[in-house]
Amino acid sequence: KPVVAIIGRPNVGKSTIFNRIVGDRISIVEDIPGVTRDRIYSSAEWLNQSFNIIDTGGIEVGDEPLLQQMRQQAEIAIEEADVIIFMVNGREGITAADEEVAKLLYRSQKPVILAVNKIDNPEMKEQIYEFYSLGFGEPFPISGSHGLGLGDLLDEVVKHFPKKSDEEYDESVIQFCLIGRPNVGKSSLVNAILGEERVIVSDIEGTTRDAIDTRFTRDGQDYVIIDTAGMRKRGKVYENLEKYSVLRALKAIERSDVVLVVLDGERGIIEQDKKIAGYAHEAGRAVVIVVNKWDAVEKDEKTMKEFEQKIRDQFQFLDYAPIVFLSAKTKKRIHTLLPMINLASESHHMRVQTNVLNDVIMDAVAMNPTPTDRGTRLKIYYATQVSIKPPTFVIFVNDPELMHFSYARFLENKIREAFEFTGTPIKIIARARN
Ligand code: GDP
């Protein structure tokens, strides 16, 4: 998905515009139990194209001086975005701070679209002309408070999206990435999987790559590791603004079939791990949980069970994800990882036979009658699998409202018992039969 960043000095109205563009999507995202997410980025859609948008102003960078903050925002935008919206305040004209931001943006190769905010009525349009002098071409008048001009602005933004590249790898290649907070051992794991110390790519000014893709074959299966960890040390920005490294992880997740959620067995689970794991789940990817540094843990026969229980308690939304305990350092149990990735990927792609599926559903209903609501009972007519990655089932019913969360969950469990869906989320959609 393309990424759009909004940048500009404080109080030009970035967050207002961000919220307008994003609409009610944020609340949808936050409805998923156990998943918390920051509001500085979100997915959005325009002209049937979905993209991710970042509000660089939505972050507090402590008491650092303004200029420093803006510099960081610009760096993030330049690094992460495919298109940058540079926002200024039409009521105040060009300020020194705007010029500073402009200077930073000149250096980027990314398309920059100039949005002049607070142009609340047509008479004020005159005020946009002075902004031509910033050197980013035609300024787009907008009004965050009145919601004006956004359509034209987004039309322009969408025009600059990179052309959709064809699928980079063919279907038979399993693409996977590793996500996790800093220092859980992602880079070490990548090296352990690949079996050699790779040369660190040198840091070339102006190049922007989100991840290093490494293709390899093991036991006849082709894989691509999408490695974001190796890129991390490029700039201080990511250490200061950890939140933004999440965006990079999201991009890697989107390109992956299987996501390895890496935890630090030595340090244990913290809130940040939960958040990161939530992204993989939300994206509908297959997930394998990897507990690294298991060599460094003092253990007895109960330690692993206890850790596993902690994971199950803290990551309830990932109850389908298998857990692998290993050590990147000693390579112990590293060899179990690829088979687990294969299994998760197979589940993610699996199609079940319609007649078998319907038998399973009918057996489930016979065992646990459907719920009733105000005298009406949920009737299930027929179920079918409509897609893979993740497997998605539509169940035709008399009234979808009657399909309560707990009953859908029950059906999901029955489907899981009947078929081997290890490592993949599955979706159940109730639809009225017409
Ligand atoms: P990343 O930030 O997730 O990529 O983490 P790194 O791969 O850079 O590793 C962070 C630190 O953890 C380094 O000092 C590694 O040597 C150490 N480390 C990584 N894997 C293991 C492991 O399996 N066992 C132990 N004891 N240390 C590890």
Image: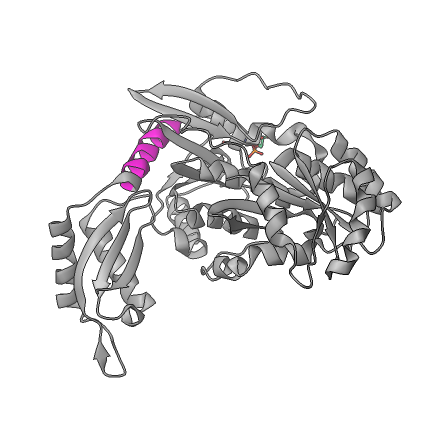
Give the x, y percent position of residue 91. Answer: 82, 56
Give the x, y percent position of residue 264. Answer: 51, 40
Residue 269 visible to an observer of this rendering: no
Image point (62%, 31%), residue name: 232
Query: Which of the colour schemes (rainbow, by chain, secondary structure, one colour) is used?
Result: one colour
Give the x, y percent position of residue 310. Answer: 44, 53
Residue 354 visible to an observer of this rendering: yes
State the count of labels: 0
Q: Give the main secondary structure of the magenta stretch.
A: helix
**Residue nearer the viewer, 377 or 203:** 377
**Residue nearer the viewer, 391 or 312:** 391
Q: Is residue 254 left or right of residue 78?
A: left
On the rendering, which quadrant does ligand 1 occupy?
top right
Is 379 in the magenta?
A: no
Q: Specify the farthest residue to the right.
A: 96
Image point (27%, 66%), residue name: 407
Give the x, y percent position of residue 280. Answer: 45, 45
Image point (70%, 58%), residue name: 143
Q: Is residue 311 left or right of residue 382?
A: right
Compared with residue 254, is residue 89 higher up or lower down, i.e. above or below? below
Q: Is residue 257 left or right of residue 63?
A: left
Q: Which residues are magenta?
A: 334-347
Looking at the rendering, in which quadrant would you find the C terminus? bottom left
Compared with residue 424, is residue 170 higher up or lower down, i.e. above or below? above
